[in-house]
Amino acid sequence: MSPSLIFAVFAIALVGGSLFYLFFYQSWRRQRALRQPFPAPWKTLLEEQLPIYARLPESQQNRLEQLVQLFLDEKAFYGCDGFDITDRVRLAIAGHACLLLLNRSFSHYDDIRSILIYPDVFRVQHAWEHGMIVNEGEEIRAGEASSFGQVVLAWSECEEPINDTDCPHNVILHEFAHQLDFLDGDADGAPPMAADQAERWLDIMSAAYDDLQDAIEHHHNPWLDPYGATEPAEFFAVLTEAFFQQPAELHRAQPEVYDLLRDYYRLDPLAFTARHL
C-alpha cells in the first residue's frame, strides 16, 4: 500500500471518528446508559435523600431515574478536604439537581462537567467594587456555581433539607438554578425562554424583586430569604428553592411568581403536596 493511500485511509478514519464524536457519541452514550436498569439500592437512596420522589406519579419517578442515570454517568464527583464521595452523596445531589429538569431537557446540563463537594462551608477569594475601588477578601460559602462547568457544594448544607423537609433552603436546587440561568451566558435571573414568556417574566419578576428590596429597606420581615434581594440572579435561585421547598407559601404570597415558575419548570409541586396529604 502506497504512503499516499495509507494517509488517505488514516484521514478518512480520523474525519469519520471526529464526526461520530461530534454528532453521535453523546446520543450513543446516553442510550447505552439508559439501557441499564436503575439499581435497586439507588432507588432506596433516592427515596431517602429526595423526599418529593415518593410523591411523584410513577411515570415521573421513572423519568427522574433516567435523568439521574445520565447525570451520574456524565458528571464527575470530587471530594475536597478529605470528603468521601459515596452513593448516598451522589444520589442526593443528582436527585435534587435533576428535579429541575423533570419536564425539561437533560441537555440543559450539558456544560456541567464536575461537582466538587466539601464536608462543610468553604472559603473563597472574592473581589467586589465599591465606587472606583476594588476590594478583595474571603467569603464563606455553602455553594458556588460557575459558567465553566463546575458546581461546588458544602455537604453539611446539602443535608439540611434532606433531614428536615420543612427547611426552606436547598443549596443544591439553588446552585443548579444558577446553572440554568447561565444557559444564555448571563446570570441575570432570567433563564432562556420563549419571547412571549420572557416579557411576562420580566414584568412580574421585576416587580416582585422590587417588593422584596423595599420590604428589607423598610425593615420588614419578608417570608422569602432576604438573600434573594442581592441581585436578580440570586432572586431566581432563591425563588427556585421556595418553589420546591415551600410551594404553598410561595403560591399564597406571590401567586403570579408561582405560576411563572410552574410554567418554566413545567411542574406543579403543589399537586404533589396535595397528593401526599
Image: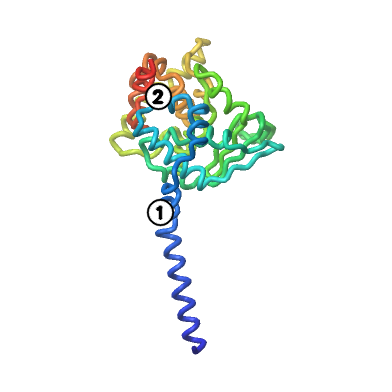
Q: Is residue 251 above or below residue 120?
A: above
Residue 169 x/y as whole percent: 52, 22
Residue found at the very far bottom of the displayed protein: 2
Q: Residue at x 31, y 39 (%)?
A: 194
Distance from disc 1 to disc 2, alpha carbons, whole Å, reads 30 Å
Which residue is at 51% across, 11% downward? 221
Q: Which mark is residue 55?
A: 2
Which circle's residue, 1 or 2, is located before the other in the chain?
Answer: 1
Mark 2 crowdedness (10 Å alpha carbons): few <14, some 14-19, many ≥20: some
Locate residue 250, reporting x and y percent. Answer: 40, 18
Rendered image quadrant of residue 151: top right
Does any portion of residue 186 appear in the rendered image?
no
Q: Which residue is mark 1?
A: 27
Which part of the image, by quadrant, shows the C terminus? top left
Residue 139, quarter of picture: top right
Dot 1: what SS? helix
Q: As rendered, which of 110 and 29 lies closer to the eye?
A: 29
